[in-house]
Image: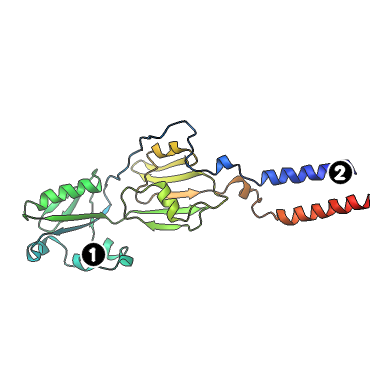
C-alpha cells in the first residue's frame, strides 16, 4: 500500500513538472552569449523596392505655387483625423514605385528611389522639388508597411505600421505580447526577390537583435507556434481537479489504514 501511494505521488510530480515552463525559456533578451551592454543591430531602415507605395506631399509658403506639384486630392486625405490614417485613399492616390525604381510626380517627373531608405527618398525628392520651388518642403511616408502576427499572441491580426524602423518586438507588442504558451523561438517569414525566406529568432536571447530579420519589412509574417506544453494538451488538462482527487484519495487511504 505504501509503495502504491509513493508511485501515485511520483506520477503527480512528473505530470506537474511536465506542465511547467522553465523560467529560462520565458525571460526575453537574456545575455546567453555574453554579448555585453553594446550590440550592433542588423539592417535597420527599410530600403524601398518596386511595388512600394509612397505618400508624397510638396509644400511651400505659397499655396498657389505648390498645388500643381500635388494630386488634387492630396490635401484632403492628408488632413483627415488620426483614426483615418489607414484610409484606402492613401493607397489609391499614393505613388507606386515602378519596375524601374521610379515614382512619377506631377511637374517634377520621375524620381528614382529604389534601394533608398524613406529618409533617402525624402532627400532625393527634396532636391528635385528645390529646382522648382525656392522654399520647398517635402513630406514622404511609406503607405504599404503592414505586418501580420499570428499564433500564440493575445491579439493576432494584420497591423499597419507608420514607422520605417519597426522591430519584431514592436510587432509582438502590437499583438498584445505572447501568451503563456507561446514558443519563444518566433518564426519570421519574408518575401524576397529569390522567394520566401524563413527564419526563427530566439527572443529569449539578445543576440536576436543582431539578425537582419529583427527589423521587420512590409508584408512580413510573424508566427508564434504553441509550446510543447500546449501541443501535448497540458494547457487544457485539469490539473487542479486531478490534484484534488488524488489528494482526497490519499487522505482516505491513510485514514482507512
Tell me if residue 31 comes above or below residue 231 in the rendering.
Answer: above
Residue beneath disc 1: 78
Q: How dense is the environment of label 2, judged by Cα within 10 Å: few (below 14), some, or many (20 and up)?
A: few
Is label 2 in contact with label 1 (beta carbons under 8 Å)? no
Judged left or right of residue 109, residue 37 is right
Mark 2 to mark 1: distance in Å?
75 Å
Disc on res. 4:
2
> Can residue 101 be seen at all in this image of the molecule?
no
> Can residue 3 be seen at all in this image of the molecule?
yes
Residue 227 screen position, x and y as percent: 58, 46
Residue 71 screen position, x and y as percent: 17, 63
Residue 151 screen position, x and y as percent: 51, 53
- Which part of the image, by quadrant, shows the N terminus? top right
Q: Nearer the viewer, residue 3 or 143?
A: 3
Q: Quadrant of residue 213?
A: top left
Q: Nearer the viewer, residue 109 or 67?
A: 67
Residue 124 screen position, x and y as percent: 16, 47
Q: Residue at 11%, 64% (x, y): give it.
A: 67
Q: Secondary structure at mark 2?
A: helix
Q: Quadrant of residue 46?
A: top left
Q: Residue at 45%, 38% (x, y): give it.
A: 206
Mark 2 vs 1, N-terminal side = 2
Amino acid at each position: 500500500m505504501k509503495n502504491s501511494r509513493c508511485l501515485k505521488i511520483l506520477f503527480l510530480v512528473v505530470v506537474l513538472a511536465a506542465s511547467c515552463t522553465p523560467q529560462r525559456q520565458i525571460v526575453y533578451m537574456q545575455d546567453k552569449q555574453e554579448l555585453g551592454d553594446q550590440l550592433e543591430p542588423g539592417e535597420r531602415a527599410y530600403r524601398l523596392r518596386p511595388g512600394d507605395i509612397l505618400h508624397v506631399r510638396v509644400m511651400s509658403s505659397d499655396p498657389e505655387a505648390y498645388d500643381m506639384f500635388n494630386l488634387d486630392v492630396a490635401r484632403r486625405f492628408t488632413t483627415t483625423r488620426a483614426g483615418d490614417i489607414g484610409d484606402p485613399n492613401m493607397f489609391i492616390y499614393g505613388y507606386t514605385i515602378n519596375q524601374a525604381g521610379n515614382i512619377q510626380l506631377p511637374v517634377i517627373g520621375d524620381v528614382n528611389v529604389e534601394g533608398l531608405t524613406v529618409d533617402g527618398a525624402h532627400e532625393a525628392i527634396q532636391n528635385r522639388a528645390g529646382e522648382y520651388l525656392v522654399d520647398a518642403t517635402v513630406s514622404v511616408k511609406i503607405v504599404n508597411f503592414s505586418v501580420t502576427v499570428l499564433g500564440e499572441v493575445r491579439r493576432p491580426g494584420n497591423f499597419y505600421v507608420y514607422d520605417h524602423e519597426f522591430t519584431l518586438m514592436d510587432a509582438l507588442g502590437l499583438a498584445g505580447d505572447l501568451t503563456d504558451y507561446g514558443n519563444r523561438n518566433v518564426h519570421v517569414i519574408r518575401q524576397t526577390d529569390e522567394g520566401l525566406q524563413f527564419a526563427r529568432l530566439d527572443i529569449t536571447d539578445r543576440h536576436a537583435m543582431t539578425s537582419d530579420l529583427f527589423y521587420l519589412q512590409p508584408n512580413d509574417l510573424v508566427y508564434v507556434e504553441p509550446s510543447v506544453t500546449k501541443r501535448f494538451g497540458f494547457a487544457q488538462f485539469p490539473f487542479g481537479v486531478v490534484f484534488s482527487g488524488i489528494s482526497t484519495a490519499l487522505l482516505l487511504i491513510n485514514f482507512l489504514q
